[in-house]
Image: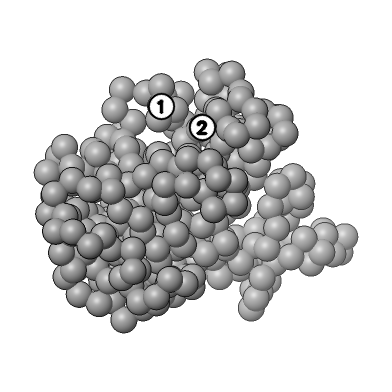
Amino acid sequence: MDVGLRLLQLARDAGALSLAVVGTSKNAGKTVALSSVCEALEQSGLPFGLCSIGRDGEPVDALSGSAKPRYLLRPGAIAATAAGLVPMHPAFEVLAFSGERSALGPIVFVRARSAAYLEIAGPPAASALRRVADSLASLAPFVLIDGAVDRIAALRDGSDAIVVAVGAAAPTQAHAVDDVRALVARLRIPACDPARESLVLDGALTAAHAAELVRLGERRQVVVADPTRIAFGGRAFLALSAKLDVRCLRPLRVVACTVAPRGLERAFEPRSFLRAVADATGLPAFDVFAGLEAA
């Protein structure tokens, strides 16, 4: 099975013009999942743009020293990255400066002239990422985003699809499944019902605030601006959201999950892990390396 093609199909079926991959933790397989979609777009001949909320595609992890998956871009692909990361050879041409900055300096848009690896670095703020993604959308018909859970407020204008990646970073498979169940549930909170009474929050919903609302017997819709304004996750979110009707003004669209059953410290049985993630989230789940799907 071509997992990248399936992920692209799910995004298009949802009417999305871009696809973001976010992870439940580090080493969750985000880059591998996104690279598979890059390959699917390249095979289809559809130009695309690639950007990130941070730094991705570097050959070695700065903290662990372990090898990391890289982005291999083929002719026609466009990426947003720090100017200092653009290789000094003719594989890439600089198209324009974005006007945004990353931690590594100003961000430029580059186009691949020949197949070559590229590190990508993006802005640290969600609003800047949205501007970069919008600029990429003017250069390519489809945009890919290597995202971060706490920064995806940028992905709330209705044109983005989201894939959640989960790996073997948790101490047990059960913990990893709980993590992805909670994250998917948080990202998929429904839109508020304007016909019903609501408690609209200006800022974030914290675990302490949610627990207090449960204690007070709150029955109204508890409405936040978007799912990223929920400032807690994991089992606490699952427990408290079961007792509160949490809604949002700008919902997100999560279309699938991917699994990376082998981590730096442990490994889970691949088919069991894949099946458990699909069952826990109610979403199609994919093992990119094995080319497997659990519906």
* Image quarter in which the N terminus is found: top left
Identify the residue at horizontal 28%, vertical 63% (top origin): 86
104 sits to left or right of 174:
left
Identify the residue at horizontal 37%, vertical 23% (top origin): 291
- Residue 36: image x %, image y %? 32, 38
- Residue 230: image x %, image y %? 65, 62
The residue lying toward the viewer, choosing from 68 and 48, is 68
SS for tag 1? loop
65 sits to left or right of 159:
right
User: Residue 128's image quarter?
Assistant: bottom left
Where is 109 relative to 282, above or below?
Answer: below
Tell me if mark 2 has few (under 14), some (14-19) or many (20+) residues whose alpha carbon lies within 10 angstroms of its own. Answer: many
The residue lying toward the viewer, choosing from 28 and 206, is 28
SS for tag 2? strand
User: Residue 112's image quarter?
Assistant: bottom left
Provide the residue designation for mark 1. Answer: 289
Whole-Å distance between the Cαs marked 1 and 2? 8 Å
- Residue 133: image x %, image y %? 32, 66
Per the rendering, the mark at residue 151 is: none
Per the rendering, the mark at residue 260 is: 2
Amino acid identity at mark 2:
Ala
Amino acid identity at mark 1:
Phe
Identify the residue at horizontal 33%, vertical 31% (top origin): 3
Task: Name, please, the residue furthest toward the bottom.
Answer: 99
Q: Is residue 282 visible?
A: yes
Where is 185 relative to 209, above or below?
Answer: above
Task: Indicate which disc, 1 or 2, sits on the residue closer to the N terminus.
Answer: 2
Where is 174 relative to 58, above or below?
Answer: above
Mark 1 near mark 2, Cβ–Cβ under 8 Å?
Answer: yes
